[in-house]
Amino acid sequence: MKGISIKRRRDKDAQLREFESKDLGQDIVRSRSAVVIHPRHRQLPTSLLLDPALIEKLREKADRRGIGYQTMLKIIVHEHVDEY
C-alpha cells in the first residue's frame, strides 16, 4: 500500500513541476478564455482600528458567504454609505 502512495506522490510532484515550469499567459490570451478586468477607478488604501469582536463578527458573516472579512466590510460600507 505504501508503494502506491509514494508512486502517486512522485507522479503528482512531476505533474506539478511540469505545470509550474510552463508560462500559460500567452496561451490564455490567445484562447480568449479569460478576461482581465481593470478597475475604472484607482482604489486607495485605508486604515481602521476595529474591535476584535467586530472583526470576528465580520469573519463569521464573510465565511457564510465564502468571502474574506475585508471584502465583507467593503460591501457593507458600499451598501450603506448613503444612509449617513
Image (spheres, helix red, strand yellow):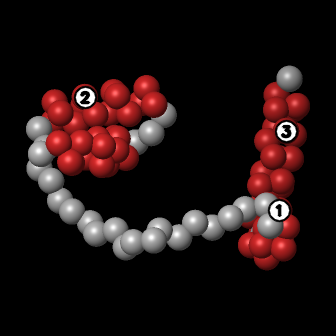
Q: Residues within 10 Å of mark 2 (few under 14, many from 20)?
A: few
Residue at mark 2: 57
| Whether residue 36 is visible | yes
Instruction: State the quadrant of the N terminus.
Output: top right
Label 1 sits on residue: 18
Q: Earlier in the sequence, mark 1 or mark 2?
A: 1
Say which amino acid is labelled 3: Arg
Disc 3 or 1, which lies upstream in sequence? 3
Q: In terms of secondary structure, where does tag 1 sit? A: helix
Task: Give the left or right position of residue 13, taking residue 66 as reference.
Answer: right
Q: Nearer the viewer, mark 3 or mark 1?
A: 1
Question: Rounded to the nearest whole Å, what is the CA distance between mark 3 and mark 1?
Answer: 15 Å
Question: Of the residues shown, which amino acid type is indicated by label 1?
Answer: Glu
Toward the bottom, the furthest residue is: 26
The total number of labels drawn is 3
Q: Is residue 45 above or below residue 61?
A: below
37 w.r.t. 16: above or below: below
- Closest to the observer, 41 or 65: 41
